[in-house]
C-alpha cells in the first residue's frame, strides 16, 4: 500500500565538498495551491516542479555552473535543506527522490549546454528552468496534466520562453476508490508510487519541429523526450534464501504521447542498431559485423575523454562463432612460404648474412606450429552449445548454484567503474552476490559499491601478489559455488550466466569457462585504442578456438567463470604476482581439470587509449608468457605434446614479433651496400603476398572495424615485446602495475619510484633503427644509381621502406 507524504515544498542541495566547490544546485517541489481544497470543492491542487541552480559565488556564471554539473554530478551528494520535512520519508523513498534530483540536474545542464541557444545572462542569481503543473486525482494520487506548458523565462523579462511538457499516467491507487476521502490527501505531493514513477523518468533533449511558415526562434528550448536515465537506482541486494516481499505496489505502465512537444514514458530498450552499409570489400562477409550504434562518451576528472563500453548486442554475441579460418590460413600459408623462400635466398647469398638465418628459422618454427594447430582446429559448435544451454539450464524447481561476481579494481576512473557496475547489477541470475575488490582503497569506490548494493572488500595486505593477492583474499572470504571475474571496464550482458552455468553443469570436470575479451572499435576512439581492439579479434576468434579442440585454451582472467571446487585445494587463483590468469588455467589443467573456451561475446570492454598504456600492457603479457615458458612445471607436466605445442605457439609469438624488427629492416640496406648486383626488381614478388595478407586479406576476414591502426599498433607491440624479452634476459623486469594508477601500490611512507622510461626508450630506438636503416638504404641507392645501376631495380625496395616508415610513424611521433 502506498504511503502518502504531505508537505508544501522540498528543497535539496547538490554539493561536492572534497573539491571545495562553491556551486550548489537545488530542486524545489512545491504545492502552488493558495488554500487547501475542501471536500465539497471540485478544485484540484496544482503542484509545480521548479529546478534551479543557485550560484553561491557572484563570479560564477551559468557556464561555470554547467561545467560544474558535468564534472561533479556523478560524485556529488544530495542532501535536503530542511530535514524536518523529510523525516517521514523512508530511506528508499529518499533514494528515489535524490536520483530524481540528479536526473533533473543533468537535464538542466544539458538544456543549458546547447550551443545553438543564444540566451542572455540570467537577471538573478538563480536560473529557473523547468516548471510543470501537476494535479491530484480524486483518490489523492498525483498525476501530471496532459497539456503543453511553458518553461520559465531563462533570461528574465523580454526573452521568449521555450515549450516543455511531461505526460505521466496516474499511479494506481493503493486503496479502494471512493468519493469521500480525507481532504488532507488532496494536499499530498508525494506517495511511494509516484516517487517510484518519478525516479524512473528517462530524459533526452530533442530538436523542436518548426511549424510551416513559422520562423525559427533561437531562444526556444528544445522539448524533452525520454531515452535513458542519467542515474539508475541500484537494485537491492538479493538473498536467494529469503522470499522477496515488495513494500510498494509496482508503478503503472507509462504511456506514450504522439505530440512532438510532449515527453512520454517508454520502456528502456537496447540501443537501436543501424544496418551497416554494404561496401565493395564486404563480399567476404555479407552479414555479421559490429553494431553501428552511437557510443557513449565520458569526460573524466582529468579532462581526458573515454568511450564507455556497453554489453554486446544479440548480433555481436555470435560474431566470433565462425572462424572462417581455412581461406585465411590458405592465403597465409602461401605468403609464409613465399617470404620464407625469399629470406633463405637472402641468407645464403653471402656469408655476412648467415647470422640472420637464426632469426628466420625461429620465426618459421613459430609459424609452422601456428599453422599446424590452425589447420587441425575445429569451429565452435553453436547448435550444440544451444542444446546444452537448453538441457542444463537451471529450472525453477531446482536448487540454483550460487555465484560470486568479483570486480577487482585499483584506482580506475570512477566513471568507468560506474558504467561497469550499472551493467553488472542487471545480470539475470537468482543466486548472485557481487563483490567489489578495491586494491586502491578509495572511499568513492566504496560509496559507489554500497549504492549498488554490492559487497566491498579492501584487503589489509596490499600490495602483496598484486591482482592475484586481491583475488585470493576475496576467495577465502566468499563461498559461492562459482565465481565470475570482470576487469574494471568490462560490461556483461544480462544473460551471461545463462550461457556459462549450463556448461559447468554439463561437464563437472570443467574448472574454468572462458569467453572472449570483446571490443568494439569506433571512430570516436584514439588510433591506439582502435588498433589494439581490432588486433584481439584474431586471438579470440581463431587461436583460442583452435587450441580449445586440444584442451589447451588459456585463461585470460576477465569474463571467465571459475569453479570453486577446482581451486579450493590451492587457495584460489595462482599464487604469482603476474599473469595469474594464465598460470591459474595451466595449473588447473595439470591437476586433471579442463578449461572450456566459448567464442561468445558476453561482455565488452575498452582497450588502452594511450600508446604508453598499450605498451605497458603488451609488455606485461609478453613477460607473463615467458615466465610460463621457462617454468620447469610446464616441461615436467603431463600435458600431451599437442597441448604443449599450443602453449609454445602462444609464447613464441611474442619472440617472433620482436625478431621481425631485425628481419624486416636489415635486408634492404645490406643488399644495397654489400651486394647491389642481387637487387633485382622482380625479387619483390617474394614479399608481395605477405604485404597483401597483412593489409587486405585480414581486412576482408575481420568482422570488426579493421583499419590501418592495426598496423600502427603492431609496430608498438613489436618494440614492447623486444623490451620485455630484453628485461627477462637481463633480469630487469619491472613490477606489475595496475592499469588504474601507477601509485596504487606504493606503501605508506614509501616514495614513488621514478617514472618508467621504457616506453620513451623504445620510441627512440624505433626512430633510430627504422629511420636510420631507411636513410642508410636511400643513401646507398643514390650511390648505386650514380655508379650506373638501373634505377628501376631499386623501386620495390623504396616502396617497402616507405611502407615501414609510414607504419612506424604513429608509434614514434604520436604519444597521445
Image (cartoon, rainbow, N blue to C red):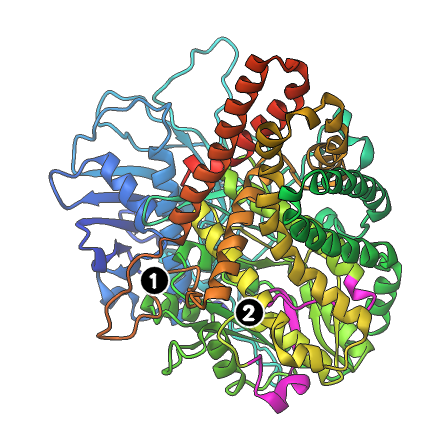
Query: Label 2 crowding class (10 Å Cα cut-off): few <14, some 14-19, many 20+?
Result: many
**In the shown orientation, is residue 647 left or right of residue 260?**
right
Residue at position x 21%, y 24% in the image: 157
Residue at position x 57%, y 37% in the image: 709
Q: Tell how many labels.
A: 2
Look at the image and tell me in which quarter the C terminus lies. top left
Q: Residue 579 carries which label?
A: 2
Query: Who is closer to the viewer here, 790 or 250?
Result: 790
Q: Residue furthest bottom?
A: 569
Element type at marker 1? loop
Could you tell me if residue 688 is visible in this image?
A: yes
Q: Tell me where residue 142 appears, x and y as whole percent.
A: 45, 53
**In the shown orientation, is residue 5 left or right of residue 154?**
right
Could you tell me if residue 816 is visible in this image?
A: no
Residue 280 among magenta residues? no
Work out whether 183 lies above or below 612.
below
Query: Who is closer to the viewer here, 458 or 261?
Result: 458
Residue at position x 63%, y 78% in the image: 431
Residue at position x 58%, y 56% in the image: 252
Q: Which label's residue is closer to the chain start, 2 or 1? A: 1
Q: Which mark is residue 6?
A: 1
Element type at marker 2? loop
Residue stretch in magenta: 547-574
Marks 2 and 1, how far apart at CA: 59 Å
**In the shown orientation, is residue 398 left or right of residue 704?**
right
Q: Which residue lies furthest to the top in this view?
A: 213
Residue 57, located in which quarter of the rendered image? Answer: top left
Query: Who is closer to the viewer here, 517 or 536?
Result: 536
Q: Tell me where residue 136 appears, x and y as whole percent.
A: 44, 51
Amino acid at each position: 500500500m502506498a504511503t502518502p507524504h504531505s508537505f508544501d515544498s522540498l528543497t535539496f542541495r547538490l554539493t561536492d565538498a572534497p573539491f571545495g566547490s562553491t556551486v550548489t544546485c537545488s530542486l524545489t517541489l512545491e504545492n502552488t495551491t493558495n488554500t487547501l481544497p475542501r471536500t465539497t470543492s471540485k478544485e484540484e491542487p496544482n503542484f509545480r516542479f521548479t529546478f534551479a541552480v543557485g550560484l553561491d559565488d557572484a563570479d560564477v556564471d551559468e557556464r561555470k555552473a554547467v561545467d560544474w554539473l558535468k564534472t561533479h554530478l556523478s560524485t556529488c551528494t544530495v542532501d535536503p535543506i530542511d530535514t524536518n520535512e523529510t523525516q517521514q520519508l523512508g530511506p528508499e523513498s529518499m533514494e528515489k527522490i535524490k536520483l530524481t534530483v540528479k536526473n533533473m540536474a543533468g537535464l538542466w545542464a544539458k538544456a543549458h549546454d546547447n550551443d545553438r541557444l543564444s540566451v542572455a545572462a540570467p537577471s538573478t542569481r538563480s536560473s529557473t528552468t523547468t516548471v510543470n503543473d501537476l494535479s491530484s486525482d480524486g483518490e489523492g494520487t498525483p498525476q501530471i496534466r496532459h497539456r503543453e506548458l511553458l518553461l520559465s523565462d531563462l533570461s528574465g523579462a523580454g526573452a521568449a520562453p521555450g515549450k516543455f511538457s511531461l505526460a505521466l499516467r496516474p499511479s494506481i491507487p493503493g486503496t479502494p476508490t471512493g468519493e469521500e476521502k480525507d481532504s488532507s490527501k488532496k494536499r499530498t505531493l508525494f506517495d511511494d508510487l509516484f516517487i517510484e514513477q518519478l525516479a524512473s523518468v528517462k530524459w533526452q533533449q530533442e530538436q523542436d519541429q518548426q511549424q510551416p511558415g513559422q520562423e525559427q526562434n533561437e531562444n526556444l528550448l528544445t522539448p524533452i523526450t525520454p531515452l535513458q536515465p542519467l542515474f539508475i537506482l541500484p537494485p537491492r541486494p538479493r538473498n536467494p534464501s529469503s522470499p522477496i516481499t515488495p513494500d510498494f505496489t509496482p508503478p503503472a505502465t507509462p504511456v506514450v504521447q504522439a505530440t512532438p512537444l510532449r515527453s512520454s514514458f517508454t520502456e528502456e530498450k537496447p540501443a537501436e542498431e543501424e544496418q551497416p552499409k554494404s561496401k565493395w570489400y564486404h563480399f567476404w562477409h555479407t552479414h555479421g559485423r559490429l553494431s553501428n550504434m552511437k557510443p557513449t562518451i565520458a569526460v573524466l576528472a582529468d579532462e581526458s575523454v573515454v568511450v564507455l563500453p556497453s554489453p554486446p548486442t544479440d548480433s555481436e554475441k555470435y560474431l566470433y562463432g565462425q572462424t572462417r579460418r581455412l581461406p585465411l590460413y590458405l592465403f597465409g600459408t602461401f605468403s609464409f612460404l613465399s617470404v620464407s623462400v625469399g629470406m633463405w635466398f637472402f641468407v645464403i647469398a653471402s656469408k655476412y648474412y648467415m647470422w640472420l638465418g637464426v632469426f628466420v628459422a625461429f620465426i618459421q618454427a613459430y609459424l609452422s606450429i601456428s599453422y599446424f594447430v590452425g589447420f587441425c582446429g575445429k569451429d565452435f559448435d553453436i547448435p550444440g552449445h544451444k542444446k546444452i544451454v537448453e538441457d542444463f539450464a537451471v529450472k525453477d524447481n531446482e536448487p540454483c548454484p550460487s555465484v560470486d561476481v568479483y570486480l577487482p579494481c585499483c584506482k580506475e576512473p570512477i566513471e568507468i567503474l560506474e558504467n561497469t557496475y550499472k551493467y553488472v547489477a542487471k545480470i539475470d541470475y537468482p543466486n548472485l552476490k557481487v563483490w567489489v575488490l578495491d586494491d586502491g582503497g578509495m572511499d568513492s569506490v566504496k560509496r559507489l559499491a554500497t549504492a549498488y548494493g554490492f559487497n566491498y572488500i579492501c584487503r589489509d595486505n596490499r600490495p602483496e601478489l598484486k591482482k592475484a593477492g586481491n583475488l585470493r583474499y576475496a576467495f577465502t572470504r566468499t563461498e559461492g559455488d562459482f565465481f565470475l571475474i570482470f576487469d574494471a571496464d568490462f560490461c556483461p550482458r544480462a544473460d551471461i550466466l545463462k550461457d556459462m552455468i549450463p556448461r559447468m553443469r554439463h561437464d563437472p570436470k570443467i574448472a574454468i569457462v572462458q569467453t572472449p575479451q570483446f571490443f568494439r572499435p569506433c571512430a570516436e576512439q584514439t588510433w591506439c585504442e582502435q588498433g589494439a581492439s581490432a588486433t584481439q579479434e584474431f586471438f579470440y576468434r581463431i587461436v583460442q578456438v583452435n587450441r580449445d579442440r586440444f584442451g589447451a585454451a588459456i585463461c585470460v582472467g576477465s569474463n571467465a567463470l571459475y569453479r570453486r571446487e577446482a581451486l579450493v585445494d590451492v587457495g584460489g587463483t595462482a599464487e604469482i604476482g603476474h599473469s595469474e590468469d594464465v598460470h591459474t588455467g595451466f595449473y588447473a589443467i595439470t591437476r586433471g581439470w579442463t578449461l572450456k573456451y566459448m567464442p561468445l561475446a558476453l561482455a565488452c570492454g575498452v582497450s588502452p587509449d594511450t600508446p604508453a598504456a598499450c605498451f605497458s600492457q603488451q609488455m606485461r603479457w609478453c613477460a607473463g608468457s615467458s615466465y610460463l615458458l621457462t617454468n620447469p612445471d610446464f616441461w615436467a607436466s603431463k600435458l600431451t605434446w599437442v597441448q604443449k605445442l599450443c602453449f609454445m605457439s602462444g609464447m613464441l609469438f611474442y619472440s617472433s614479433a620482436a625478431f621481425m624488427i631485425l628481419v624486416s629492416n636489415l635486408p634492404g640496406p645490406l643488399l644495397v651496400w654489400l651486394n647491389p648486383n642481387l637487387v633485382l626488381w622482380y625479387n619483390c614478388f617474394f614479399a608481395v603476398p605477405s604485404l597483401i595478407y597483412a593489409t587486405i586479406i585480414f581486412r576482408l576476414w575481420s568482422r570488426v572495424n579493421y583499419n590501418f591502426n592495426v598496423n600502427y599498433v603492431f609496430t608498438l607491440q613489436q618494440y614492447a615485446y623486444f623490451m620485455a624479452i630484453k628485461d627477462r634476459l637481463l633480469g630487469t623486469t619491472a613490477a606489475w602495475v595496475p592499469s588504474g594508477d601507477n601509485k596504487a601500490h606504493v606503501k605508506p611512507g614509501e616514495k614513488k619510484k621514478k617514472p618508467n622510461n621504457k616506453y620513451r626508450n623504445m620510441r627512440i630506438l624505433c626512430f633510430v633503427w627504422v629511420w636510420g636503416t631507411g636513410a642508410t638504404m636511400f643513401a646507398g641507392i643514390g650511390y648505386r644509381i650514380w655508379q650506373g645501376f638501373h634505377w628501376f631495380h631499386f623501386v620495390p625496395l623504396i616502396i617497402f621502406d616507405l611502407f615501414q616508415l609510414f607504419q612506424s610513424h604513429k608509434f614514434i611521433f604520436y604519444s597521445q
